Image (cartoon, helix red, strand yellow):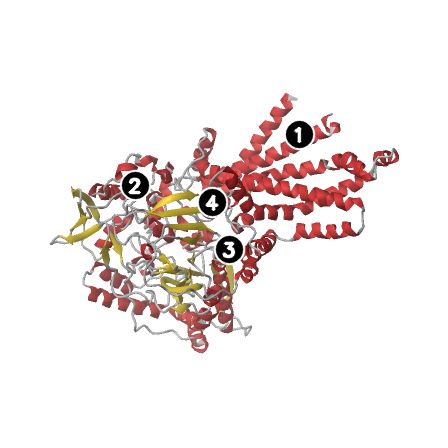
Amino acid sequence: MQARSKTALAILCCAVLLAACRRQNSLPPPQTAEPIHGGEVVVALAQDLSGFNEYTGFAESTELAILDLLFPSLLTEQPDYQLHPPSFAPALAKAWEFSEDNRTLTLYLRENARWSDGTPVTAEDVAFTFRVQKDRRLAWPGQEIKDFIEGVEVVSPTVVRFRFSRVYPYQLMDANDGHIVPAHVWGKVPLEDWPHTDFSKLLVTSGPFRVATHLPNQTLVLARDPNYWDQPKPYLDRVVFRVLPEVSQQLAQLFAGQVDLVLMVPPREAASVKQDPKLELVEVPSRVWGYVGWNNRRPPLNDRRVRRALSLAINRKALVETVYWGYARLANGPIPSTMWAYNKNLPVFPYDPQQAQALLDAAGVRDSDGDGVREWGGKPFTIELLYPGVNPLRAQAAVLIQADLAKVGIAVRPTPMEFTAMMARQEAGNFDAVLSAWEEATKVDLTSLWVTPSPTTGSNNFIGYSNPEVDHLAAQAREESDLAKVKLFLDRAQELIVEDQPVTFLYEGVQLVGLSRRIKGADINPSSVFFNLPEWYLAP
Amino acid sequence: MTARLFRRLFASLLVVWAVASATFFLASLAPGDLATKLADPRIPPAARERLREHYGLHRPLGQRYLAWLSGVVTGNLGDSFLYRRPVTQVLAQALPNTALLASVGLGLELVLGVVLGLVQVRRPHGFWDRVLSAFSLIAYAVPTFLVAAGLLWLFAYRWPVFPASHMTGLTAPADFWTTLADRARHLALPAITVGVTGCGAVARYLRGALLDEQAQAYILGALARGASRRRVLLLHALPNAALPLLTVLGLSLPFLVSGTLVIEVLFSWPGMGQVFYSAVTARDIPLIQAATILVTAAVVAGNWLADAAYALADPRIRR
């Protein structure tokens, strides 16, 4: 989660720009049945790739989606986490099997897989990639994902074996994490030199596309790789990524037909994208949910009655409708409703200021001097609400929350902060409340957010939430391999968390993708916007 | 003379060192670091701690400062945390782009400003003087992003004469001349933005200086000797009135290396402004430091050049 908009100022000019670019256009041409080869698609990117080697640093999700087009994965994670933990489809590995004791995973690689220089992609590349992933000299943040993999063994050029130190539900997912990189080229650079190496000069790839040109912070052109070994082979000749840091420019160019795809349309512009006959607005349910995190360590916020009262006093429905223009869903609990593990029977917290007042009175947060503001410890009860200052949506939400809570006698001071500085205050526990958002991984695990902080748990539980029963259930869900039982544990844990309201769950995000109707065959799904890019083609 | 030059050079180095050191401590003391920013379910805190160690952020501040300083002295500015390459490489890519935009923009600013100033003093307090005075005040006062948005609206979207963003088109031009034409087209709107927003100040300075000069006896003398107004204005008054412009220009030199964030972001121009901004938000200390050294050096050099140019242009200073 990074600060998205670059300059708050420049947003002002958005309206001026956009108004100019909405021209009436003729209806889109009729659809043809047969996909056409050729042509190019232009995608607006908020920022350039930070590099082509994901193992030397941190690559954000759009970056990984682009690397998907260049480097092979053993398997392809499917966007089916709504039904069950994500399943996997063959990719570089055509088949796989676990040993009797589930501690050994054997993968059979495709014989015809080739790097762009013609060299076969082999088990050596897989083993090399694993060594890279585990190397302490590199700053790959995913290293801990491989904690339970003891080793990777080359059985033959097309057979590779992963050995696990323990058995758990996400073994396949963890083995698959990270792209396979070319041992015969990158292996020649000593690992200690990797942090200073410009890998754009060592681009031997193996995907449907290869890099044609890259002008840093400008343009990345991917061209169809004619020798791509897998199906389907791309219809498009080129995919051009244009770096456009300012979202108003992205949209202006989308309306003007200079850009075909905008990855994140702000909710207030959604209607105009919808109205444009040349464009389509694709609503992708995301795993992002927004919340107000209360400092569970600080009195009186450590009292569950107070937190429940705060949640009851915030008109969350109005917030979703005004700030997100209806392009978000009300969030109810710690697991997004788009995921298989979501508990459908969770109670919904209504907007009920009266009940909130009663709860606050009961908790001893009362307005004893009659000035309209409740007191705590002899002083007016004021909550400082931190939010990232560059995000205009959070600023609007903060003001609405301030108004709602004022109605029940609680003073809120919205405080915009620079993102990293805000994170530092979170880490230090030096805050009352934080307005923020979280993106759930496809691997459902309550340990990092909701389990009592300890050296091995609660790593992202900066609000200091602690409920021994939740701790126990999360641990059980983590160890259990029977999915039905896992679901039971998670259901109960969700109920407890909702009862405790350690945070006020606000909204579940919807990613709005603006797409030119020139593009046909696109299946944009929560896994990645570019999930089936090889199957995209242009309308004639 | 040489001794003075060396003294000046030494003082300049001292200024660069002081500014860079102050920036180092301020950036390091700012809340949060590179690892803080990475709040992501993919990244466990163990990984964040490992990253801190990887980038040496776990060491005491003093040690980090000494390590950085010894690196600078030996010519090693370090690797960017964010771009995962040596900072020199990152800067080498951004600097020429900013220099190109800034030099063309400043050139435009100067030409526009001088023309405005000259037209204004032809008939002080006359119609054109008033109109152009108003224009230069507005140009000076209007925020850059508004000028940029207006230009974009008019010339990139309403009448698409110029491209709205980037330094190049989608397809690589075939030869030198088409490359040049392509670059010029892409340069047009951002450079005009720089020129228009900057020309007001130049025009105001020049108008004031020219009016002062015109009141001088030597101007009256030249006119009395029968020289035309135009000749007097261009050949006698302008060179003298242009002196303050040298200072203005010298002080603009840092702009050649620092870039402006707003213009670069709006026009997707991959220059130093963007590098600086992303470095600061990511707490990318090696990159912040290198960029600061560069900009400070440019400020110092700009001042120095302005002084030198002044001395060359005005014999009174040399004494």
CA separation in Å, label 3 and label 2: 41 Å
Q: Secondary structure at mark 1?
A: helix
Mark 2 crowdedness (10 Å alpha carbons): few <14, some 14-19, many ≥20: some
Mark 4 crowdedness (10 Å alpha carbons): few <14, some 14-19, many ≥20: many
Residue A423 x/y as whole percent: 43, 53
Residue B312 x/y as whole percent: 70, 28
Which chain is home to disc 2? A
Q: Secondary structure at mark 4?
A: helix
Determine whether A440 is above or below B67 in the image: below
Could you tell me the amino acid type at mark 3?
Gln
Residue located beneath label 1 in the image: B308
Q: Is residue A50 left or right of residue B214?
A: left
Could you tell me the amino acid type at mark 4?
Ala
Could you tell me the amino acid type at mark 1?
Ala
Residue located beneath label 3 in the image: A249
Which chain is home to disc 3? A
Residue located beneath label 4 in the image: B279
